[in-house]
Image (tube, grey):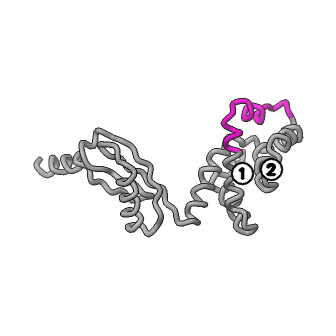
Amino acid sequence: MPRKPSAKRYAMALFQIGLDKGNTENFGKDLQTLDEVLSERAFPAFLRMPKIGIEQKMNVVKEGLPDLNPTVHNLLGLLIARRDTESIPGIIKEYVKLLDQQSGIEKGEVYSAVPLDDAQQEQLAEYLGNLTGKKIELTASVDESIVAGLVARVGDMILDGSVKTRLQSLRKSLS
């Protein structure tokens, strides 16, 4: 049985078409709309029903999402025909990554022992942006197990300034 193309390949193909047509942002908005519709339980179940024909499913999609770009609509039709609609969330995630990459935006996560206020998050995002040369969008979380300090992750880079890690390294050097 042939393997299904990955979500990344679908996203890259759609992104390339968007670049050629100058529609990358519009495709992204359409994918977000599609994601919202798919978050309803009934719609994905409907798309997976084997007794309902592809043509009938596509008619429902056209009526339910009339503003959907024809290219995104065709992608959805292809996924319905291949019975691969469960890969849509992955496609959306990969497409958003490509949009961010094009815009020079990098997603980052920061874990701290105490909650960071907005000013601290902005300052940290600016610092990380200077290190990476990109605009950083941070998601902050509290992790009390790090005792004090923080751990920041941007792409493949991890900056660990936590007391927990320092104590572990001190324990290793003493033993």
- Report the residue at 65% width, 50% height from top: 91
**Which residue of the protein is positioned furthest toward the left in this rendering?**
174
- Quadrant containing the N terminus is top right
Judge whether 152 appears above or below 19 on screen.
above
Q: Which residue lies under the disc numbered 2?
A: 67
Disc 1: which residue: 30
Does the magenta portion include 47?
Answer: yes
Q: Residue 50: within the magenta? A: yes
- Residue 149 picture location, percent across and down: 26, 49
Q: Secondary structure at mark 2?
A: loop
60 w.r.t. 104: above or below: above
Q: Could you tell me what secondary structure mostly forms the magenta stretch?
A: helix
**x and y percent of residue 34 in the render?**
71, 45
Q: How many numbered marks does the figure carry? A: 2
**Residues shaded magenta:** 34-52
Identify residue type, mark 2.
Asp
Q: Is residue 85 placed above or below 108 in the rendered structure? A: above
Figure check: 30 above or below 103: above
Disc 1 crowd rating (10 Å Cα; few below 14, some 14-19, many 20+) is: many
**Is the C-beta separation of discs 1 and 2 under 8 Å?**
yes
Tell me residue 155's x, y (percent): 45, 58
Residue under the point 82% across and 42% down? 61
Q: Quadrant of residue 131?
A: bottom left
Q: Disc 1 to disc 2, how far (Cα)?
A: 8 Å
Circle 1 sits in a helix, a strand or a loop, which is it?
Answer: helix
Lateral position of residue 146 relative to residue 98, left or right? left
Front residue of 66 and 172: 66
x 64%, y 50%: residue = 92
Q: Which of disc 2 and disc 1 is earlier in sequence? A: 1
Residue in the image at 44% along x and 54% along y: 108
Mark 2 crowdedness (10 Å alpha carbons): few <14, some 14-19, many ≥20: few
